[in-house]
Each structure stands twice: as structure tokens, then as C-alpha cells.
Image (cartoon, helix red, strand yellow):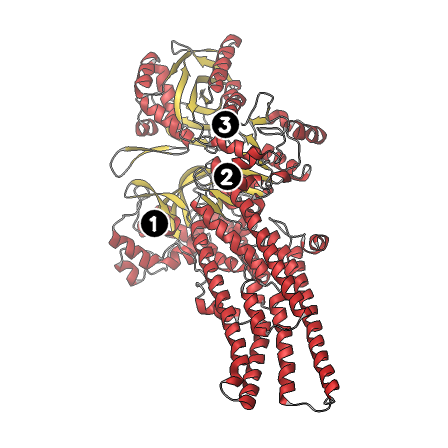
Amino acid sequence: MESYLNENFGDVKAKNSSEEALQRWRKLCWVVKNRKRRFRFTANLDKRNEAEAIRRSNQEKFRVAVLVSQAALQFIHGLTLTSEYTVPEEVKDAGFQICADELGSVVEGRDVKKLKIHGGVEGISSKVATSITSGISTSEELLSKRKEIYGINKFTESPVKGFLTFVWEALQDMTLMILAFCAFVSLVVGLATEGWPKGAHDGLGIVASILLVVFVTATSDYRQSLQFKDLDREKKKITVQVTRDECRQKISIYDLLPGDIVHLSIGDQVPADGLFISGFSVIINESSLTGESEPVNVNSQNPFLLSGTKVQDGSCKMLVTTVGMRTQWGKLMATLSEGGNDETPLQVKLNGVATIIGKIGLFFALVTFAVLVQGLFTRKLQEGSQWIWSGDDAMEILEFFAIAVTIVVVAVPEGLPLAVTLSLAFAMKKMMNDKALVRNLAACETMGSSTTICSDKTGTLTTNHMTVVKACICGKTKEVGSSKDASNFCSEIPDSALRILLQSIFNNTGGEVVKNKDDKNEILGTPTEMAILEFGLQLGGDFQVERQACHIVKVEPFNSVRKRMGVVLELPEAEGGFRVHCKGASEIILAACDKVIDSKGEVVPLDKEYVNRLENTIEQFANEALRTLCLAYMEIESEFSAENPIPTRGYTCIGIVGIKDPVRPGVRESVAICRSAGITVRMVTGDNINTAKAIARECGILTENGLAIEGPEFREKSEEEMREIIPKIQLLHHNGEKIRTKSRSLMKADPKLCHVASSSSHTRDHPIVMARSSPLDKHTLVKQLRTTFEEVVAVTGDGTNDAPALHEADIGLAMGIAGTEVAKESADVIILDDNFSTIVTVAKWGRSVYINIQKFVQFQLTVNVVALIVNFSSACLTGEQIMFVSLSM
């Protein structure tokens, strides 16, 4: 049976199965009693094809719109444009000057002409009664008016099926229909020959059995549907940062309204249609809507932002113009949702098992019917009445037929594939309580067989609550973990160096210091940015003062490829010129410096001796498990244009900061549980190698005989060298020797995990940390582990550039707090608390699901085989009795 299942049903994978594979197994499942029920939780391929056709149509429309808008730009500049648009009275009465349809047509059609007629972005903002700086008012009365005129940011969803719908679907079972017909005939003949009530016993018995089966089935299916509805609701919880009433705050994307000012950064999904207000280096991936793989630069000349597209690079402020079903993304999502999710490999294989058993059951049913009819003929031959047939004989043949049909009811385990879904749904709900949101149903079962976990360091193994605890500025290294320490350190830094340092901290950042509702400072941004900004405030700096003192000309946001961030400032007239600030990975920024600020605050050449001192400082910080960042700047005398690239060399080193990010409680124990269960834990990080090794040792991942490798070194390896070193040193930090499940002590560690520990068959001799890795390194490693070494790989990721590795892995694990929307969309499971221990919990549930399904299949097959043998050998049970046996299944 196993070879048959692998050959005919083994093409379906946990992720990215071909349509051919999905179609093939459906054709093989022809013994189906109730198609609606059997295939309820499988993808609707016809709906998917319809959605794809709509997507292609939309893509063509958008391509035309882009071409038209580009052509329009060449003609409208300098022209005096007039508008024939009339504002509807109800819109005027609500306090607005533009209706929802007119507003939507500007962005969706990329209508440059209309945008100019309405006064550009500022004109649109005034017409929707909002301020580009303050946002909309949060007054309940004004919000309700806005909702009434422009709608809400929610998509049309398919209505929830009621209980009676599931009853009706359960009644679609072909065998139950046949039994119902048999019951009707039995009642008619019985009442005609034996009268009431004796003649109705058999017929009513069958009816009662059918109704019981239908209502038990419908109740189970209805409860399942409610569970999936709850999970879908959790998946859609996405928050965005907006400005309302001059305060930055986080709100659900479903609470967005036209007029809202949304703050977008790299990795975000654009939550509604809107217009670009301000920002730097904004690159948008519109492939989900237009089908074009080439990203689009969004700026004041091309200000259109479409719902559902992704921010590939940069950051910006956006004015929301259109929400909900008025956007093309809303219309598309309504269609796409009808296609359903891909079925899991286990579901497909159990459908194959059900089909095989169904064929056997059908054979047994025919043979049983033939044996019973033959027995009747034999008896009549012995009695000499073979030519005389009465109503009782017809009823007896009908009863034989009912028994044969009932055997099919018992033999075809229609609930077998659904049992997988039910078990996975139960596990998904339990995992939600354990801070893991499963986006892809197949991930539940795949995680149970994982043999390798490739984990990030920051935020997963560590708390992601960062603080600058040490700094080396102007050649002086001090602890600055408290406000008092920072204040003392500040007094030792020359004024000129302090001014440069604060300018760098507050301008070269992706974070912000804003006033909250209580009029207190609140720091927004990534944990690293928040730590640096907090350090700047402790040094006596003022974010708003520093920002207003200079004009930002260009920003290159940090990403995991460059491992640096840069900003170009136009200095005040008193100073003149431009200044570039740069920060990032210490050794990379230090290598770009040829000067340094000394203890007197003067800029001096960076000689070899000073370089060695700074490198030793970096190594010292890293050995103390601190993340290190280097800050540098450069003066530019000549004019600088935003189109010019930011220089990469010739900087002056300002200093180095060491950021403490403590290891999460319980990580060491979780890593030990993984080892005892045969799961290799590997660490891939972009941090300094010494920092990575220190954290890895603290987590219990890297042992004395372990090895660490840097991304650039790994990148230079040939395919053959990779095949040689990966099994030898177990690329990524890993903990250990091959785990055998013979030891009883391992079972004590965690029985759920240890149950299938023997499935891991690769020898693991030398754990390793991969440091200064790029997203491409992670992708290469995952691909090698999956293809060459046939490992089942789980990978964590939080950034936009982690998406390829998350997509490549058997199980992609995105971080719920630090993760971008792009990473989450590519992931199968979202770790809501960003905790490594939660990943171990997911593995436990995955293995628990396998054990539960295994036990259910054993029970199901036992009942099937026993029922078939009993009926074939004796053919003495009535149809009602067999139906009650079926209920236990």
C-alpha cells in the first residue's frame, strides 16, 4: 500500500505543489460517498483559475493605467486644467469636498490630470478634511461621518455557513440516499403487508440510523468551521502606525479611513490606496497587482500607492484615499479567498487510503449481496418454490441490498481525511494559545518531522529589549548603561564631538521620538534604533531640535545586504555644505574610515595603531555578548543631489557603541530539548562573529568542539566544499552529537518530541555559528540542507530579505513582533512572541498531531476490517446494527 500511495499520492508537497499534482490525486479518488464533505478542506482549483484570470485582467488594466499616466505627465505640465467635477450635497454636508468615487479614481487610475486638478496631495488632503502633519481628528462624530461617506477598510467575506447547511451537506452522501430509498420502500411494503406498527420497525430503524449519522456528522463539521473562522480572524490582525490628532499610534488596518496619515517602512504591506506625502528611497513591489517584477520608485512625481503592494525599500508617509472594497486589492481578495488553501500531504495520502479501502469495501459489498441472494435462491430451490416469488421475498432481497449498501457506508472511511483536518485544526487552536499562529495547515504536520531549526539570534534567542551599555567615543571607553553613567560620559566628550555624535544619532535613524497622549517622549522604531535614540536622549540631545537644524537630502535605509544606513544632510547656512552620516556593522564601517575624532575632539588620520585599538574594542564588546555599531561621518564641500549615491569610503569615525540584548529565559532548556529529540539547532545571524559565539555559548548551542563561520567565507565555498563541510560542521550553530532515543532520560526530557527522535538520521559532530551572514547565505544553506542532505528544515526570519529563505524552507517561521508583513506573508507559522521556546512548542504539537492521527488511523482501519469480515462471514447483522457500528468510527 505504501508504494501505491507514494506513487499516486506522493506528488503533493507541504508547499508549492503543482496544479498537475493536485488534479491527479483528485481523479484517483473516484470512490467517494459525499464529495462536498470529503473535499471541503481542499483547494477549489476552478475558483483559483477564475481568480487568476481576474488577476491577469487587473494586471493588464494597471499596465495600461501606468502607460497612460506616464504619457499624461508629458503634456499636463504648464497647462491650465479645469474641472467639471461637482461635489455631491451629502459630501458637502459632512464637511468634505470630494466623494469616494472621485477620490478612488485618482489613485486606482493613476490619474495625474485629476490629481493636479484637485491641487495635488495637499489639495486632496484639505478636501478630505485632514492635515498632513496632524492627521484626522479622533472625535467619534467626525469618524462616523468619514465612515459614512468613504466606507471602512474591510473586505467582503463569504458568509458563515449555518448548522443547517452542514446538515444538508451531510445528506448529500450517496449511500445515505440509497439507504433512505430502501427505508421508504421497506416502510411502504411493511405497512402494506404487516400494518402499523410492526411493519414499520425495519424502515424506521434505518431512518433513525441515517438521521443520527447525519446530525453527528453535521455537528462535528460545524464545530470545525467555527474553529477555522477564529483562526482566519487571528491571521488578519495587522497593525499600522498612523498620525491622528498629532499623536503617532498603532491601529488595526481595518480601522483605517480616508484622510489617515500612515507611516510605512521597508517590509510593510500598503494597507489601502493612497498618495505619497514624503519619504526617502521608496521602492514598491507591485507584482501582486500588476504582474510586473520590476519594482517602482514612488516619489512626489509618481505619488500613487496601491493597496496590497509591498514596500521593498525606504520609508514614507502616505495619505489614505481609498479603502476596503473600493480598492482593486479588495475586489481581488474577495475572489482569491474562494479558492481555499492547498491540501496537506497527509490529507492527500489519507484520501488515497480511503479510496483503497472504499474499493475493497465495494468489492465486499457486492460479494456479500451475491452470497445472500445465492442463499435465498438455494433455499427456494430446496423448497421447490423457485418460480414462486412473494412480497416477502422482494423485501428480503431489498434487505440484502440495504445490508450491501450499509457495508459501503461502513467500509468507505469518508471521515479519515477530515480527521486529519480536525486534528490539525485542534492543534492550530492550541498553538494560538501558545503564541504561534499557523497560516498554512500543512505546517502543523511538517513541523512534527523537522530535523533542523535555523534560528536568528536577535529577538528569537534574545529578548530584543536593547540598551546601549558601553561606548567608545573619542578614544574613551566607558559604561553608559544608566542615565548617570551617560551624563558623566557626556561631560568627558569635547563639545565639537558631542555635537557631531548627537547629529548622527538623531538624523541617521529609522526611528522617531514623538509625544504620546500624555505629552511624554515615546521612542518608536526597531529595538536597535530605540536603544541608540535613548542613548542620545541620555546624552542631553533633543530629537526635534536636531531634526529641524538640518535638511535631510537623501536617506539609504538599513538593510541586511548593505549592513549599513546612511543619510545626507544639508547643513545650515552658517556652516554651509553637506554632511554624510553613516552607521552599521562595526568592522564594515571602520573599514570605510580613514580618519577619527581623537580625545581632544580633533579629526586626525586613522593610523594602524588606532585601527588596532578600535578593533580590539569591537572584539572586547563582542566577547561580552554586545552588539556593536560604528558611527561615522563625512564632509562634502560640493553640491550633492538626491540622485547621487552616498559615498562608501573616506569617513571619519565618531565612535563605537555596544548594545546589550539579553538571552531569553528558557532558551537553553529549549535547545537541550531539541537536541534530545534529534532536532539540530543552527544559528544564522548578521552580527559580529564574536558576539554570535558568545550568545551561542550562553544559549547552549555552541559547545567546546563547535565551529563558527562567517557569511563571506561560506559564500566563497564551491558546491563540493559545501557538501563536504555542511555535514561535518553542521552549518549554523548547532549543539551536537547525534541523538539516539535509546536513552530513557531523553524520553523524560519531553515525550512528545522524543517520540520520533529516531527519524533524524544524520550525524551531527560539530555545531557552528554563522555570523555576518546575508539573506542569500541563509537561503543557500536551507537549500543545501533540504536537497543535498534531505533534512526537514524550519527557518526563522523577520526581514523583507528573509522571504526567499522562508519560502524555500519546509517550515517558514516569521516573527510576529519584529517581523515585517513581507516576511509574515512568506511564512507558514507566525511566532507571536518572537520566542525560541515557542518554536519548540510548535514542534511538540506537530509531533503530537502525528501520534494522534496514527492512533486514529489504526482504530479506523481496525473497525473497517472487522466490520467487513463480520458481514462477509456471517451476513447476519441487520443494516441498523451496522450503521450504529459506523457511528463509532
Say the numbered circle drawn on residue 839. 2
Tell me which label, 1 or 3, sits earlier in the chain. Answer: 1
Tell me which label, 1 or 2, sits earlier in the chain. Answer: 1
Q: Amino acid at mark 1?
A: Gly
Say the numbered circle drawn on residue 259. 1
- Find out whether the residues at labels 1 and 2 contact each other: C-beta distance under 8 Å: no
For numbered disc 2, what is the local secondary structure? helix
Query: On screen, 681 above or below 420?
Result: above
Q: Amino acid at mark 3?
A: Cys
Q: Residues within 10 Å of mark 3 (few under 14, many from 20)?
A: many
Residue found farthest to the front: 383
Q: Going 30% across and 27% down the picture, which residue do you hit?
A: 545
The image position of residue 832, as x and y in percent, is 44, 42
For numbered disc 3, what is the local secondary structure? helix
Q: What is the quadrant of residue 178 in the picture?
A: bottom right
The image position of residue 11, as x and y in percent, is 67, 52
Q: Amino acid at mark 2?
A: Ile
Q: CA distance from mark 2 to mark 3?
A: 15 Å
For numbered disc 1, what is the local secondary structure? loop
Query: On screen, 14 above or below 226?
Result: above
Say the numbered circle drawn on residue 282. none
The image position of residue 166, as x and y in percent, is 48, 67
Say the numbered circle drawn on residue 699. 3
**Which of labels 1 and 3 is toward the front?**
3
